[in-house]
């Protein structure tokens, strides 16, 4: 109910309808844009703010007009999630621990299911997006990737969705370059999608060399780095 009221309120304050997608039939019908985690907690003032994260939202709105298929993703953790430092007595945000599936960086509490911080940015304007993938909802498994959870085996269902839609090419943008964007891009490439990261429409957390590592991982997986101006040219 709250969500629908918000939508109505937004309509009253925004008289101009959103521009229709520019991409027409035959153009990019086999491509999807994946806009990663454009959520309040990852924007300045949020609980896990990515520096410059707000700059990505208008870029996402612009890019989306060039894709008939847009996927939005949402980090969506239950309270007490295993990735929260607060779930591990004596640990602080950005400490690391070993979990059954591997190393885990501990984060401030963020993107708790149904909280304000978990909402998509109010400035995000992509009315034609048809699916939102919520990830990280298992209490004991994190999920940076929007294709597979951090155990590398539990699927979110996104690759099945894309294949059912005849999509073989993926473009990603969003937050954060070095976590959810890069893990998603590497998985997309590994699972056979032609994969591009729109690098100037991403922003990074850069924890302890994570950005350099992310670009190395993406390069070895065959992910192509592109610029927004070239994608929408
Ligand atoms: C993310 C850290 C924890 C991200 C999500 O969206 O990149 N990073 N959860
Ligand atoms: Zn998270």
Image: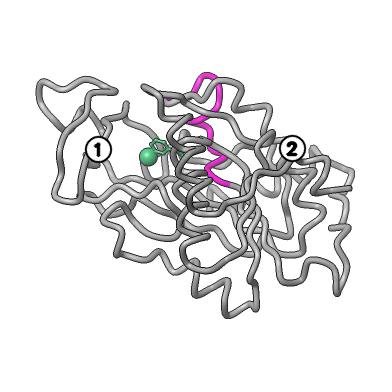
Main SS category, magenta section? loop
Q: Secondary structure at mark 1?
A: strand
Q: Are marks 2 and 1 in contact (CB under 8 Å)?
A: no
Residue 164 in the image: above or below residue 35: below
Q: Residue at (44%, 69%) from the top-left corner?
A: 157
Q: Which quadrant of the figure has residue 28?
A: bottom right
Q: Residue at (47%, 30%) from the top-left corner?
A: 212
The numbered dot on residue 145 is none
The numbered dot on residue 59 is 2
Tell whether 167 sits left or right of 213: right
As drawn, the residue found furthest toward the front would be 220
Give the percent coordinates (x, y) of residue 35.
61, 48
Tell whether 85 sits left or right of 59: left
Which span is picked out in magenta? 36-47
Q: Residue at (55%, 20%) from the top-left corner?
A: 51
Give the CA distance from mark 2 to mark 1. 30 Å
Tell whether 158 sits left or right of 24: left
């Amino acid at each position: 109910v709250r969500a629908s009221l918000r939508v109505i309120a937004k309509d009253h304050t925004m008289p101009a309808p959103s521009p229709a997608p520019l991409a027409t039939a035959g153009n990019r019908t086999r491509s999807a844009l994946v806009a990663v985690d454009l959520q309040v907690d990852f924007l300045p003032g949020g609980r896990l703010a990515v520096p410059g994260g707000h700059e990505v939202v208008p870029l996402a709105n612009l890019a989306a007009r060039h894709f008939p298929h847009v996927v939005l993703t949402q980090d969506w953790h239950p309270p007490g999630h295993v990735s929260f430092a607060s779930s591990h007595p004596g640990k602080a945000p950005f400490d690391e621990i070993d979990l059954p599936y591997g190393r885990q960086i501990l984060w401030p509490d963020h993107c708790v299911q149904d909280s304000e911080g978990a909402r998509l940015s109010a400035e995000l304007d992509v009315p034609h997006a048809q699916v939102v993938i919520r990830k990280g909802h298992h209490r004991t498994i994190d999920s940076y990737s929007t294709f597979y959870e951090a155990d590398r085996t539990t699927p979110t269902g996104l690759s099945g969705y894309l294949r059912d839609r005849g999509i073989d090419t993926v473009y990603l943008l969003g937050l954060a370059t070095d976590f959810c964007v890069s893990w998603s891009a590497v998985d997309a490439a590994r699972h056979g999608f032609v994969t591009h990261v729109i690098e100037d429409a991403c922003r990074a957390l850069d924890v302890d060399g994570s950005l350099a590592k992310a670009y190395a991982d993406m390069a070895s997986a065959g992910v192509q780095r592109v610029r927004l101006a070239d994608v929408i040219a």
